[in-house]
Image: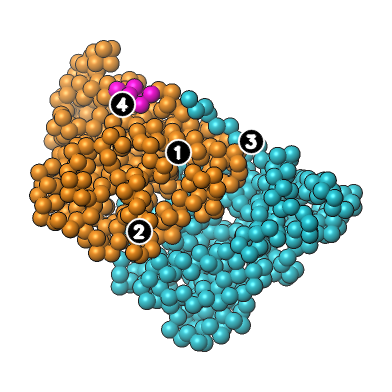
Chain colours: A cyan, B orange
Amino acid sequence: MTTSFHPPERTLMGPGPSDVNPRILEAMSRPTIGHLDPAFVGMMEEVKSMLQYAFQTSNALTMPVSAPGSAGMETCFTNLVEPGDKVIVCQNGVFGGRMKENVERCGGIAVMVETEWGRAVDIDAVEDALKANADAKIVAFVHAETSTGAQSDAKTLVELAHKHDCLTIVDAVTSLGGTPILVDEWGIDAIYSGTQKCLSCVPGLSPVSFGDRAIEVIQNRKTKVQSWFLDLNLVMGYWGSDGQRTYHHTAPVNTLYALHESLVLLQQEGLENAWQRHQHNHLALKAGLESMGLSLIVPEDERLPQLNAVSIPEGIDDAAVRLRLLNDYNLEIGAGLGPLGGKIWRIGLMGYASNSKNVMLCITALGSVLRDMGYEASLDDALDAAYRVLSR
Amino acid sequence: MTTSFHPPERTLMGPGPSDVNPRILEAMSRPTIGHLDPAFVGMMEEVKSMLQYAFQTSNALTMPVSAPGSAGMETCFTNLVEPGDKVIVCQNGVFGGRMKENVERCGGIAVMVETEWGRAVDIDAVEDALKANADAKIVAFVHAETSTGAQSDAKTLVELAHKHDCLTIVDAVTSLGGTPILVDEWGIDAIYSGTQKCLSCVPGLSPVSFGDRAIEVIQNRKTKVQSWFLDLNLVMGYWGSDGQRTYHHTAPVNTLYALHESLVLLQQEGLENAWQRHQHNHLALKAGLESMGLSLIVPEDERLPQLNAVSIPEGIDDAAVRLRLLNDYNLEIGAGLGPLGGKIWRIGLMGYASNSKNVMLCITALGSVLRDMGYEASLDDALDAAYRVLSR
């Protein structure tokens, strides 16, 4: 007979999920109530309004999709793309490739703009693609590429797209709560994120926000949205702000308690303070890693503070290092994906996990394992370097 | 500033979510680990194997979809239906209508077989439809109609479909764990359920199971599955049993802890005992309700024990009764849907909520509210009638 599962206590410094604040875990374990209960409906309104704060938007259609970030991505594409629509898809990592899959499965045409993995999306290349494809309807790009740690210039990309009469779909799975996202100021039309990264919440929900122009496109589609579950015309009836709740699907009640609590925490800290904390801990980790002779693959002005892509030194066995970190230190860091597999580690400092204790743990653990494998580095110097930044 | 949300403590006797066992709530609040962590992968294997027990199947492709029951439904249709495919859809309540939407959004042709709401699916009508549509590929029906409390004869319907060379898609959202579902013995090809009904778990996951014939159809599709998120060809790489886990999406880790614990509880009780408990408490509730002059709309041999559809007596204000039950007794029961709106209440006795305390609470609370509204009934007699059944 199978017995209860008791997970090991890890420190999650991979690409997500990141460490979940214990307050959020406790909130999630509160008694389940009905998804049409007036008390639940009141909580939903608070979630929407706190998500507006997190996204810096007044978009009425700002809510969590009842499934992980990949479903948030699909919500954007399946609602906005109709058969034959042309979408400029910027790819500089794994998730641009997933966007292409989404466009094509909606019957759309994906025009790919490729940028080297580890770099921000190439603005000039996007402009060229827009000029060459005057009939494009949408520009889609990843703001924070979780597979490489690169941050793209969302503001400029949105401006450019609008200049060419295109809507924008923005992947903010790893950026929300960790690095500035200003939906209204930048004019983003459709955006999706995840709960398990810089919001410190459990995985399972995808916050999304849609502006007026995007909603107009959705409401004037020629064809039905191909997914019933993700059809915003129906979902709006459930999450809508008209006070009436039409039953659509059963919301993941307890996971929404968790998101509510994570957004209360974000409000209490303040968005600007959260961004600053991510930057501060990133600089400390970077100082420690660089002192050990390790380098980040993304150029300094394109780096995400919450996701550090570190080159694996020559001769070091990627998988062996990660396994020892997990077994000896209960520390999870991420592997590289696709062409970066075996070449980088992805060290997350996201949400609750972005703290000085984790910075020092990571330097200590990674440094010790590397030294044990024959790599030369001074832990004294690395910890000093990190500590100097942390104590600023 | 928004503060933490503390839900009222309800007793959930609606159509689901049902009361969640506190052991499950506690399990869910255990520390999050990575979705590719070896410890998590081991837990996933246990979840799969316990779901096989719950579904009474040896299907290798038995796993939870990372989203609510509606997404489980969509997983079945979007993977099995290709443009132009003809699907016989049996409708005897709300969820058959949702199946039709799914078929059509996949580009399929839905041949509707309508049965009166509150009755089991009409076998003869299905046979007629199969004879009239020799090119049909799939028969889809709801085993346990949550909107009416009617149970259909899944075994016979599957036999009939197979006789006409059709695959079957079965909605078991409300039946799994509450009433017999024998996937292998009955030969069901594709089935989906939900976690928030008779498994006593939180909402947010949809257990599914696919047999060999269904998998063969999926693997030999002419077109790509239109949903990337729900494409089983990709999901199988993540949940597959080859020991290799390919990253697909981030699994809802903590909700899976909850499902694991709910399945441990089901194993400990034993499936047959769980079915019997649901039946026993149903009979007690029925005795109490009938003693008060209330009647169930579904004929006795087509009734679901876990979902009791009760006729609202003439002159009684549906919404006022439910509101008073909620406010005065923290008791949630469900409203009717569609043509049954205002005509029935739906009283669930599902999973952990199927217990003698809830039977007596429901009779007491509903009886008291009705008497206060001028409806004549003896609570003494009703409680006696229920108690006589419970003490058998």
Chain of the residue where label 2 is placed in the rendered structure: B
Name the residue tied to disc 1.
Answer: B48
Amino acid carrying mark 4 in the image: Trp
Marks 4 and 1: in contact by CB < 8 Å? no
User: Quick one: A96 or B333, which is closer to the camera?
Assistant: A96
Distance, label 1 to label 3, CA atoms, is: 20 Å
Distance, label 1 to label 2, CA atoms, is: 24 Å
Q: Is circle 1 on the same chain as circle 4?
A: yes
- Tell me the number on the disc at residue A8: 3
Residue B220 part of the magenta-drawn span: no
Residue B51: x and y in percent read: 41, 36
Q: Name the quarter where the C terminus of chain B is drawn.
A: top left
Chain of the residue where label 4 is placed in the rendered structure: B
Residue A225: x and y in percent read: 34, 64
Marks 2 and 1: in contact by CB < 8 Å? no
**Which of the two discs, 4 and 2, labels the residue nearer the N terminus?**
2
Instruction: Please tell me which residue is depicted at 66% across the width and 52% down the height of the picture.
Output: A334
Name the residue tied to disc 4.
Answer: B275
Q: Tell me where the magenta segment starts and ends, as one range.
A: B270-276
Q: What kind of element bears circle 3?
A: loop
Name the residue tied to disc 2.
Answer: B220
Amino acid carrying mark 1 in the image: Lys
Q: Is residue A3 left or right of residue B329?
A: right
> Total of numbered circles in the picture?
4
User: Quick one: B189 or B88, which is closer to the camera?
Assistant: B189
Distance, label 2 to label 3, CA atoms, is: 41 Å
Q: Quadrant of residue A331?
A: top right
Distance, label 4 to label 2, CA atoms, is: 37 Å
Q: Nearer the viewer, mark 1 or mark 4?
A: 1
